[in-house]
C-alpha cells in the first residue's frame, strides 16, 4: 500500500511514535508499504519549528530523517499544485491541501488524525 504522511504523522513517527495510533504504527512498520513524505511537510516543519517544542525536537536534517525512517520524499509536481488549488474549500490548511492533492494523484492513503481530510474522498488511515 502507498501511504502519504500528514505532517503530524511524520513528526510523531520520529520524535513521539507513541502518539501514533496502533494502526498507523503497524502500517509504517509494514515492509510492503511505501511511505511517502510530502515536501510540504518539510516546509511546514521549518516554518513552524521556532514556535513549537515538538518541532524543535525534530532533527535539523530532515532529508536524513526521512531516509533513516525508510521513507521516500514526495516532491510537489505542478499537477499536484494545481490540484491542491482546485480542491473544494473544505479544508483551509495549505499544507494539508497539497498533501491531499498528492495523495489523490498518486493513489495513496493519507496517514492522519485529521478527520476533515476524509471529506475529500481520499482514503485516510489512523
Image: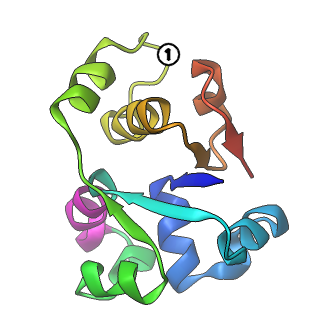
Q: Is residue 55 above or below residue 68?
A: above
- One can see residue 57 in this view: no
Residue under the image location 32 percent in, 88 percent down: 59
The furthest residue to the front: 32
- One can see residue 35 in this view: yes
- Residue 42 position within the rendered picture, expressed as x and y whole percent measured from the top left: 27, 63
Which secondary structure type mostly characterizes the magenta part of the structure?
helix
Q: Is residue 109 above or below residue 122?
A: below
- Residue 97 position within the rendered picture, expressed as x and y whole percent measured from the top left: 38, 31
Q: Is residue 121 left or right of residue 66?
A: right
Q: Is residue 29 left or right of residue 46?
A: right
Residue under the image location 39 percent in, 38 percent down: 102
* Quadrant placement of the N terminus: bottom right
- Residue 110 position within the rendered picture, expressed as x and y whole percent measured from the top left: 58, 45
Q: Is residue 125 above or below residue 51?
A: above
- Residue 108 position within the rendered picture, expressed as x and y whole percent measured from the top left: 55, 43
Residue under the image location 31 percent in, 34 percent down: 94
Name the colour scheme. rainbow
The furthest residue to the left: 78
Q: Is residue 68 above or below residue 44?
A: below
Q: Quadrant of residue 48?
A: bottom left
Magenta residues? 42-51
Q: How many marks?
A: 1
Q: Residues within 10 Å of mark 1 (few under 14, many from 20)?
A: few
Location of mark 1 (residue)? 90
In magenta stretch: residue 123: no
Q: Quadrant of residue 17?
A: bottom right
Q: Quadrant of residue 85?
A: top left
Q: Secondary structure at mark 1?
A: loop
Amino acid at each position: 500500500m502507498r501511504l502519504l504522511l500528514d505532517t503530524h504523522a511524520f513528526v510523531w513517527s520520529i520524535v513521539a511514535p507513541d502518539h501514533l495510533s496502533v494502526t498507523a504504527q503497524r502500517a509504517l512498520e509494514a515492509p510492503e508499504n511505501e511511505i511517502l513524505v510530502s515536501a510540504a511537510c518539510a516546509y511546514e516543519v521549518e516554518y513552524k519549528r521556532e514556535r513549537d517544542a515538538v518541532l524543535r525536537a525534530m532533527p535539523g536534517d530532515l532529508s536524513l530523517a526521512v531516509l533513516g525512517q525508510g521513507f521516500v520524499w514526495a516532491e510537489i509536481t505542478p499537477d499536484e499544485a494545481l490540484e491542491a488549488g482546485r480542491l473544494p474549500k473544505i479544508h483551509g490548511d495549505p499544507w494539508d491541501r497539497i498533501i491531499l492533492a498528492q495523495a489523490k494523484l498518486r493513489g495513496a492513503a493519507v496517514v492522519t488524525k485529521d478527520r476533515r481530510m476524509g471529506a475529500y474522498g481520499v482514503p485516510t488511515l489512523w
